[in-house]
Image (cartoon, coloured by chain):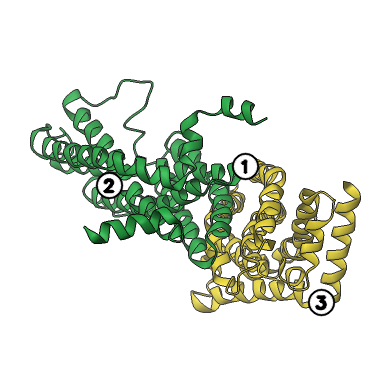
Amino acid sequence: MMRVFWAELSRDLLLAFRHKGDFLNPLIFFLMVAVLFPLGVSPAADFLAQIAPGVLWVSALLATLLSLDNLFKSDFDDGTLEQLLLSPESTYMIALAKACAHWITTGLPLALMAPLLAVMLFLPTQAIATLVISLLIGTATLSLLGAIASALTVGLKKGGVLISLLVIPLYIPVLIFGASAVQSAVDGLPVTAYLAILGAMFALSLVLAPFAIAASLRVSVSS
Amino acid sequence: MNMLKKQLMPKWFYQMASPKWCYKITGQLLPIFGCAALGLLLLGTVWALLFAPPDYQQGNSFRIIYIHVPSAILAQSIYITMALAGAVGIIWKMKIADMVAYACAPIGASMAFVALITGAIWGKPTWGSWWVWDARLTSMLILLFLYFGVMALYAAMGKPSKAARATAILSLVGLVNIPIIKYSVEWWNTLHQPATFTLTEKPAMPVEMWLPLLVMLIGFYCFFATSMMLRLRTEILSREKRTAWVKELVTKSSVR
């Protein structure tokens, strides 16, 4: 079981490393969306500090959303996905490995780059640690939930907008608790409750989402 | 194995799987539910608007509750029905269950929409604003978005059997939202008031107020059953149009 997981994970990571655009594009998108707010709304430092938690979380969510389209696409196009599902190995583990690889290539770099943007948006320094932790847990949930929608739409020609439509309702709770955690840190309030709920959502989706991903992939691959 | 299965599930469950039988039985049930819906909704509306006493704080503006509460309850019930029908469709590969799920989605979406609109209209005189971002309202809005997602996925998928399985998975995932809506007024300190109806406790409203509400609620359920069966029957005919019994039915009715 674990052997399949590691094999699939290392394969996906290697592929992502060879196509550097796969994990650079969401990062650049994250940077650019966050830059739009000071330019479009107001560059005043105290105003930016107020909206920074929400802006950073929304930008991270949109960047994750953008990267979902490619999650299964190339494997579906060249028939790898069908072979994976036909193999006697556990589809649960394959689905988990795919979501995990997606997180490592998008969520993890997003969370690590967030402090840079936090400084640019004048987020108070005491909130930066919470921002990174909440993004680390939150983007993992986003990857797992997003993989379900990506798996459902992979066989469709016009999947792009549809993915957003399917996945945003599922993303809203993560956004609410993620942004609230950072906001509480800015206000100097305890953040453990929000982080615990984020962790609970992560644990739930970690256990259940791979079933839904595997079932969705089977639907998409079936003619 | 077959014998064992037959004991596990009631007989009607297997009969329901036949589109022809389902078409026949819904044809018999339709007038009953249709009349009940019409009668109960008329009775409930007249009772609620003319005879129920005005609220001592909100005056007559509270009367929108007779649309708001039933539509909000229905929006959630229909979502659960849709998800369960989808699950039955996946597990037993039952075409009728797929069609039930398909028939539910637009009705549920319109119920969620009505609940949000009436809530906004009610919110203006009571809270002083059309919309507040509290947990109940937000989770209800998410429910509406989930319905939109399910309908969009139906529209995008070509083949009905494949679309049914895909949307069933999506609606089962979205089922997580239902307890969040239900308990949002208890978990968070919201502006929205707690539930009007609970199964276990006596309602806090006087009898003259909640009895018409109950009538309206049952009327709404009957209305849902009626419109769902109408959509289901149309769907059965269009998906089974190549079978002999549908051809026979259509040719016979065109003669008449």
Circle 1 residue: A197
* Marks 3 and 1 on same chain: yes
Dot 2: within a 10 Å radius of its alpha carbon, few (fewer than 14), some, or many (20 or more) residues? few
Q: Amino acid at mark 1?
A: Ile
Q: Which label lies toward us, 3 or 1?
A: 3
Residue B80 is situated, as x and y percent measured from the top left of the image, at 47, 41
Q: Nearer the viewer, residue B3 or A68?
A: B3
Q: Is residue B144 visible?
A: no
Q: Quadrant of the C terminus of chain A?
A: bottom right
Separation (CA) of disc 3 from disc 1: 35 Å
- In this image, A186 relative to B96: left or right? right
User: Can you identify the residue that label 2 sits on?
Assistant: B127
Label 1 secondary element: helix
Q: Which residue is mark 3?
A: A19
Q: Chain of mark 2?
A: B
Residue B224 can be seen in this image: yes
Chain in yellow colour: A
